[in-house]
Image (cartoon, rainbow, N blue to C red):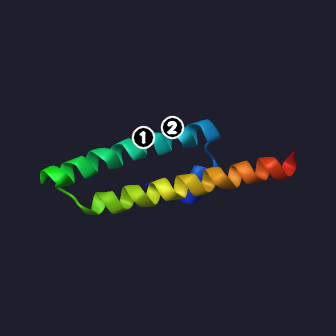
Amino acid sequence: MMKASQLRDLAPSELKERIAGLEEELFNLRFQQKMGQLSNPLRMRIVKREIAQGKTVLREKKNAAAAGA
């Protein structure tokens, strides 16, 4: 789990890749849950939180770029 300060150091393209990977992981976790094979249900909460943090930082970067332009 990365901290928000570490996420802010990433480039927007890297953030998008990270978010896409986390969304894929969340899909797989949901699939495992439906199949009754999920070993760590807490992981879903963590992944959701990381996605939200990534999207928040990405939005901050876009707003900063728009304000600077």
What kind of residue is marked 1? Gly
Q: Is residue 6 visible?
A: no
> Looking at the rendering, in which quadrant would you find the C terminus?
top right
Is there a contact, CB below 8 Å, between mark 2 and mark 1?
yes
**Is residue 50 positioned above or below 9 on the image?**
below
Label placed on residue 56: none
Q: Nearer the viewer, residue 42 or 10?
A: 42
Query: What's the residue at 63%, 41% (across, down)?
Result: 12
Crowding around mark 2 (Cα neighbors within 10 Å: few <14, some 14 to 19, many 20+) is few
Q: Which residue is mark 2?
A: 17
Q: Position of residue 9 (x, y in %)?
A: 63, 47
Against 7, is 49 above or below? Answer: below
Residue 21 has which mark? 1
Give the residue displayed 18% in from the left and 53% down from the top.
Answer: 34
Side of 61 where 7 appears, left or right: left
Q: Which residue is at 71% across, 48% downward?
A: 62
Q: Given the current orientation, which residue lies at the most extreme right position?
A: 69
Whole-percent x, y for residue 13 in the image = 60, 36
Q: Quadrant of the N terminus?
A: bottom left
How many numbered circles does the render carry?
2
Q: Residue furthest front?
A: 34
Q: Position of residue 3 (x, y in %)?
A: 52, 58
The image quarter containing residue 45 is bottom left
The residue located at (14%, 50%) in the rendering is 35
Three-letter code for the amino acid on which mark 2 is drawn: Glu
- Please indicate, yes or no, whether residue 47 appears anywhere in the rendered image: yes
Disc 2 versus disc 1: distance between alpha carbons?
A: 6 Å
SS category of the residue bearing label 2: helix
**For this view, does 23 lie left or right of residue 59?**
left
Task: Give coordinates of residue 24: x percent, y percent.
Answer: 37, 42
